[in-house]
Amino acid sequence: MKSWLALIGRDLRLAWRQRGDLFMAVSFFLLVAALFPFALGPEPNLLLRIGPGVVWVAALLALLLSLERLFALEQEDGSLDLLLLSPLPAEAIVLAKAASHWLTTGLPLVLAAPIVALIYNLPFDGYGVLLLSLLLGTASLSLFGATGAALCLGARRGGVLLPLLVLPLAVPVLIFGTAAVDAMLAGLAARPHLLLLSALLLLALPIAAFAGAAGLRQAAE
Amino acid sequence: MGTPNDMATGDESLPARQLEARELGCLRGGWPIFAGVTFALSAGEALVLVGTNGSGKSSLLRLLAGYLPVAAGELLWRGVPLSKDPDLHRSRTRYLGHLDAIKAALTPREDLSFWAQLHAQPDRRVEAALAAFSLQELADRPGRMLSAGQRRRLALARLTVSPAPLWLLDEPTVGLDTASQKALVAAIARHRAAGGMLIMATHQALPGVTDAAQRLDMNRYRPLPPDPEALLL
């Protein structure tokens, strides 16, 4: 566990030293979300209707941006070889990298989401459900993303392959995340959708650990 | 949970052979790299791999580190096949490849202390490792400011941060000046005196190491050339 935290700690420190990259994902998220009103017109009812979906799609695209480098940098400089010889099993390495990806990309997006909610004039009592669904959903997306990043290691054109691999996995998260916010706006219970999001998160953990670890071992050959 | 040194699992009469390779063969991407590699190492012994470029020195080291699967033959640690417990083999192996694994934004001290924490080693080993390769003055400089030779010294210092019985070094002397080579020789001597084993690929004679080691000429283990017609089909 201590070794696991040491790896996350190092990644957070590296991310903080290069914090320009952190703001990149958040700015991209805000920009994409701000584009829709320009394209569709500022009609409040329309914006309220598409708001939840836009937040989710923008968050998903922003998360994809930084995924490719998640393991590629470690492989390029030789760190991956050394990590694979550490006491951490490859499964734990994938989970640690997913955790640091979420802390450096997912969490800032969740924190920036109220700005987007404001643009789309979502009612204030919906913010709780929106943020909770994003917290659960972005964590799953980081896990699926880390899986894809590990599997694409060493593939030529990994940057193109990665979204093709990750986006289909992201669809259920997108559906239940948007449904949670929509349900709340329609005055229905958001709880079932949030529970389904939690279930997806639990499902993503073993998938990321095992498939991701296989990808890392393959990449070291 | 380690086995005591005197508990040899194989032939009791022979000197305790720690690591033994029998007729090892290696494939990379379907191409044979070498075949029939056989050697045995006891505690404190060193093996130097020599051979022309492309003769499979790096592949053999990667195979011994467990990155590449054993395609033919057997690899034994005290008589037990390594594939039985890959996790255990990881914990007793340190590898240094062509890349130095240095992060531009981390200082050498932070770098070594991360690897010490990862291997659950006390922080005092970090200072000792910095001193062993005269890195104290560079300890707080970011990695991007280090020269090629300094990066190599940091990568070598990392080996000494967490002790392990088997060192696999792939051309460790590249870019090192005379003083740093002496530091490497001293580090290897300490490692071997503590019962550690060393397998090193090199093109360069390293006084104090290469003259007191077994030699394995990788040119002798060229695989049979694959049937060209079979490859075309």
Image: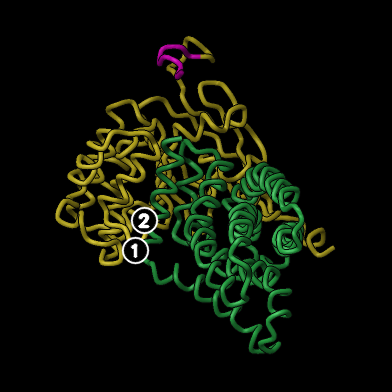
The residue drawn where x is 20% and y is 47% is B182
Residue A47 visible in the displayed image? yes
How many numbered discs? 2
Residue A183 relative to residue B172: left or right: right
- In contact (CB < 8 Å): disc 1 and disc 2: yes
Chain shown green: that is A
Image: B115 above or below A136: above
Residue B181, numbered label: none
Image: A78 above or below A21: above
Secondary structure beneath label 1: helix
The chain letter for the residue carrying disc 1 is A
Residue A106 location in percent, x, y? 54, 60
Residue B181 relative to residue B78: left or right: left
Q: Gap between marks 1 and 2, in whole Å? A: 6 Å
Residue A17, numbered label: 1
Is B172 contained in the magenta span? no
Q: Quadrant of residue A186?
A: bottom right
Circle 1 Cα neighbour tier, 10 Å, few/some/many (<14 / 14–19 / ≥20): few
Q: Which of A91 and A106 is in front in this view?
A: A106
Q: Chain B is drawn in which colour?
A: yellow
Q: What stretch is highlighted in magenta?
A: B1-8
The residue drawn where x is 44% and y is 48% is A8
Residue that carries the numbered disc 2 in the rendered image: A13
Q: In which quarter of the image is residue A122?
A: bottom right
